[in-house]
Amino acid sequence: MTWKAKVKPLAGGLTPRAVLEKFVAMQMLDVHLPTTAGRDLVLTRHTEPDADLRLLLAHMKLNLPAQPRRRYGYLAPNPLSQPCRRSEDL
């Protein structure tokens, strides 16, 4: 089944390109929060769809996955966890 054939009965009046352009508003991002232990807490999140996209998702019988679980790890040295040097210490 082609995208055009799938979209036609479910997204009445929208072209396949217009449907794809609605999905462009969805974003996925990683939020890195430093901890005092020098590790990063990584939260991978997707944006919540607006009303139009929620309606389109419902008509197409598509469900967004739940927000992913948080991850801990040593991703990179965290400059915020390092003590700051004062000019008199140099």
Image (spheres, rainbow, N blue to C red):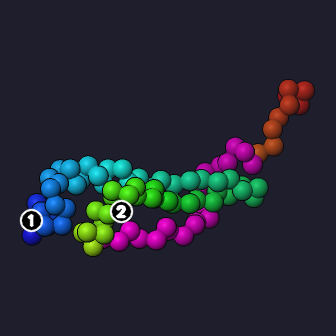
User: What residue sits 56% from the left and 53% below the top?
Assistant: 31
User: Is residue 64 part of the magenta span, yes or no?
Assistant: yes
- Please give the label number shown on residue 20: none
How many numbered tags mark residues here? 2
Query: Could you tell me the amino acid type at mark 2?
Result: Arg
Looking at the rendering, in which quadrant would you find the N terminus? bottom left
Q: Secondary structure at mark 2?
A: helix
Q: Where on the picture, by quarter, is residue 14?
A: bottom left
Residue hosting label 1: 5
Position of residue 52 in the picture relative to residue 2 (left or right): right
Disc 2/disc 1 C-alpha distance (Å) = 21 Å
Q: Which comes before the other along the chain, label 2 or label 1?
A: 1
Look at the picture and state if 9 lies above or below 76.
Answer: below
Residue drawn at 82 percent across, 34 percent down: 85
**Could you classify mark 1 by the number of other residues whose Cα lies within 10 Å: few (under 14), some (14-19), or many (20 or more)?**
few
Q: Is residue 16 visible?
A: no
81 or 18: nearer the viewer: 18
Looking at the magenta stretch, what is its main secondary structure? loop
Name the quadrant containing residue 19.
bottom left
Query: For the magenta stretch, what is the residue range?
Result: 62-81
Crowdedness of circle 2 by 10 Å Cα count: few (<14), some, many (20+)?
some
Residue at image x 41%, y 71%?
65
**Nearer the viewer's eye, disc 2 or disc 1?**
2
Q: Residue at x 32, y 63 (%)?
A: 55
Q: Is residue 58 visible?
A: yes
In reply to whether residue 65 is colored magenta, the answer given is: yes
Q: Is residue 30 left or right of residue 41?
A: left
**Residue on which disc 2 sits:** 54
